[in-house]
């Protein structure tokens, strides 16, 4: 498999198809308008962004990443991170656990992990490669597959904003559990990445739960 599937044209087409079969999705699509792009390159820097963004607000994560980028001389690479002192990483706001995880990921990349080459792997293979890195679980793999590899049918059930956005769109009383959300997403195959984009944007812009 290769090629970035989540092009703007594909996103618009998939959203139109989703809306055609679901009145609540159609109403949410009308409320949010054009879905924002979240595309990132399949690089070590993107892995770092994903790690930094775990369980943090978008603003907090962006602030930490900007400080880290500055500490690494303006370029977030595996080589630069491995050469950085622990003090400089800590002063950037990166927690002790994440510093350890990022060093492990950097070592894997330096040791031959070809992140760009994952574009040629199927979803299962790409997911396994990301999840093999310590500190990078299913949520991290979902985000990398969606935004760095552009896979069109990823459903990040562990993401709180996706769960909240889905609940708001579908008029649920509470956020579904990851297990329940997985089942609720089944009817939307093979366009679940665009549904996730809609959930994120609805949560951020319209009616957070």
Image (cartoon, grey):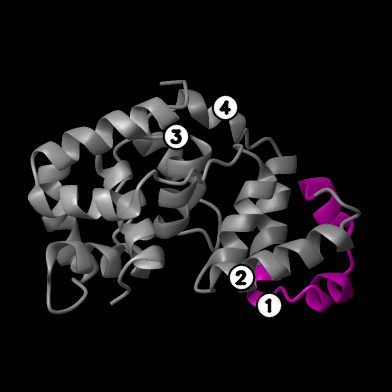
Residue at point 66%, 64% (across, down): 62
- Badges 1 and 2: C-beta atoms under 8 Å apart? no
Give the position of the C terminus as an image quadrant: bottom left
Q: Is residue 96 magenta?
A: yes
Q: Nearer the viewer, mark 3 or mark 4?
A: 3
Q: Which residue is mark 4?
A: 117
Whether residue 203 is visible:
yes
First in sequence: mark 3 vs mark 2: 2
First in sequence: mark 1 vs mark 3: 1
Q: Is residue 42 above or below residue 204?
A: above
Between 167 and 154, the residue placed more toward the observer is: 167
- Give the image location of residue 18, x and y in percent: 17, 39
In the displayed structure image, the side of residue 48 where residue 147 appears, left or right: left
Q: Which residue is mark 2?
A: 59
**Could you tell me which secondary element the residue under label 1 belongs to?**
loop
Q: Which residues are drawn in magenta? A: 76-98
**Could you tell me which secondary element the residue under label 4 belongs to?**
helix
For mark 4, does the 10 Å Cα neighbourhood hold few (<14), some (14 to 19), or many (20 or more) residues? few
For mark 1, does the 10 Å Cα neighbourhood hold few (<14), some (14 to 19), or many (20 or more) residues? few
First in sequence: mark 3 vs mark 4: 4
Q: In whole angstroms, how far apart are the C-alphas of marks 3 and 4?
A: 13 Å
Q: Nearer the viewer, mark 1 or mark 2?
A: 2
- Give the image location of residue 3, x and y in percent: 47, 21
Q: How many marks?
A: 4
**Could you tell me which secondary element the residue under label 3 belongs to?**
loop
């Amino acid at each position: 498999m290769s090629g970035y599937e989540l092009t703007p044209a594909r996103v618009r087409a998939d959203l139109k198809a989703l809306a055609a079969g679901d009145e609540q999705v159609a109403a949410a699509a009308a409320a949010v308008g054009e879905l924002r792009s979240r595309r990132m390159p399949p690089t070590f820097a993107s892995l770092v962004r994903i790690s930094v963004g775990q369980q943090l607000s978008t603003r907090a994560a962006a602030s930490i990443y900007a400080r880290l980028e500055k500490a690494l001389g303006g370029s977030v690479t595996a080589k630069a991170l491995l050469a950085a002192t622990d003090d400089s990483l800590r002063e950037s706001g990166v927690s002790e656990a994440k510093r350890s995880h990022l060093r492990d990921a950097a070592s894997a990349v330096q040791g031959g992990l070809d992140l760009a080459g994952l574009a040629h792997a199927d979803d299962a293979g790409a997911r396994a490669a990301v999840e093999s890195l310590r500190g990078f679980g299913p949520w991290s793999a979902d985000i990398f597959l969606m935004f760095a590899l552009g896979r069109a049918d990823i459903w990040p059930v562990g993401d709180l904003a996706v769960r909240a956005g889905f609940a708001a769109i579908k008029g649920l009383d509470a956020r579904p559990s990851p297990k329940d959300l997985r089942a609720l997403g089944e009817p939307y195959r093979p366009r679940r990445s665009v549904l996730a984009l809609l959930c994120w944007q609805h949560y951020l812009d319209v009616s957070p739960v």
